[in-house]
Amino acid sequence: MRAILMPAIFVLAAITGLASATIAAPDPEAVTECDKLASHGSDPERVAPGVGQSSMRKAAAISACLADTSMQPENRRLQYLLGRAYFYSGRAADAMPHLIFSAEAGHRQSQFVLGYIYDSGLQGVEQDRCKTEALWLRSARQGRFAALVSYPHHVVRGKFDDCDVNASTDEMAGFLDTAKGMASDYYRRAWTADVTDDFNVYRKGKR
């Protein structure tokens, strides 16, 4: 009996091993239901069309993003989208861990959004402009348009005076030059031009 059973066991083990070997890990760039329901139109890493705050089906987005992040817990884009859906639902305490994870993982849109939340003290989050300074600098160095302009805008207005401002005037000038090249519509061009004018006055005063 044993001689008959052993080959069957080996066959079962071989089949099981083959099946496990052929199960592919989720593709981090694949479009998920979370992407479809919660993507931000200005996110450089988005893989689906953007969904505005007013049109987002928030409960469905949270449910989808919870499911998708459970399959890909290290996916910084999906973590950001879950945080976005929570925040738009007025659930800042639930949103913040996901936004922080995503920002720390290098997601430039999350870095900018999280910095904005700290800058404005939204939904009862403690205002901390030094956290904003650090987050927007990282986002600007990765080429996020809003950070490229907002960072020098805040520096010029002294909003980071109590922080360790880590960008030199030369680097900030570079940020604005990059933003100018990215400004694809009238409002972006006008905003960039206004901040650049203010920055040039500020820079002359530093010399």
Image (cartoon, helix red, strand yellow):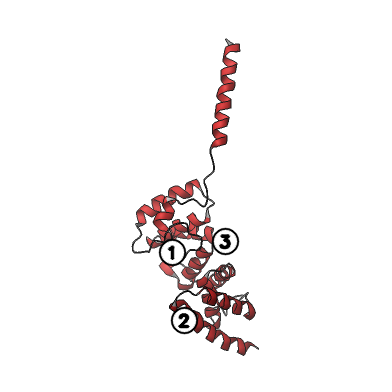
Residue that badge 3 annotates:
106
- How many C-alpha atoms fall within 10 Å of the one at disc 1: few (<14), some, or many (≥20)? some
Quarter where residue 40 is shown: bottom left
Most extreme residue toward the top, as rendered?
1
| Foreground disc of the pair 3, 2 | 2
- In the image, 177: left or right of 98? right
- The residue to which callout 1 is attached is 41
Disc 3 element? loop
Give me the C-alpha separation between circle 3 and circle 1. 18 Å
Q: Label 3 neighbourhood size at 10 Å, few (<14), some (14-19), many (20+)?
A: some
Q: Amino acid at mark 3?
A: Gly
| Mark identifier at residue 190 | 2
Relative to residue 171, is residue 54 depicted above or below?
Answer: above
Q: Closer to the camera, 171 or 119?
A: 171
Question: In the image, what residue type sits under mark 1?
Answer: Gly
Q: Quadrant of the N terminus?
A: top right
Q: Calculate the distance from the C-alpha at mark 3 to the C-alpha at mark 2.
A: 29 Å
Could you tell me if residue 204 is visible in this image?
A: yes
- Who's the residue at 50% across and 83% down the image? 193
Q: Of the residues under marks 3 and 2, which one precedes in the sequence?
A: 3
Towards the viewer: 24 or 116: 24
SS under mark 1: loop
Q: Residue lying furthest right in this view? A: 207
In contact (CB < 8 Å): disc 2 and disc 1: no
| Residue 34, percent from left and from top | 43, 53
Residue 71 x/y as whole percent: 49, 46
Q: Amino acid at mark 2?
A: Ala
Picture coordinates of residue 68, whole percent (x, y): 46, 49
The residue lying at 57 percent from left, 78 percent from top is 177
Q: Residue at x 52, y 60 (%)?
A: 100
Q: Residues within 10 Å of mark 2 (few under 14, many from 20)?
A: few
How far across and down, in percent of the image, does residue 21 sit? 57, 35
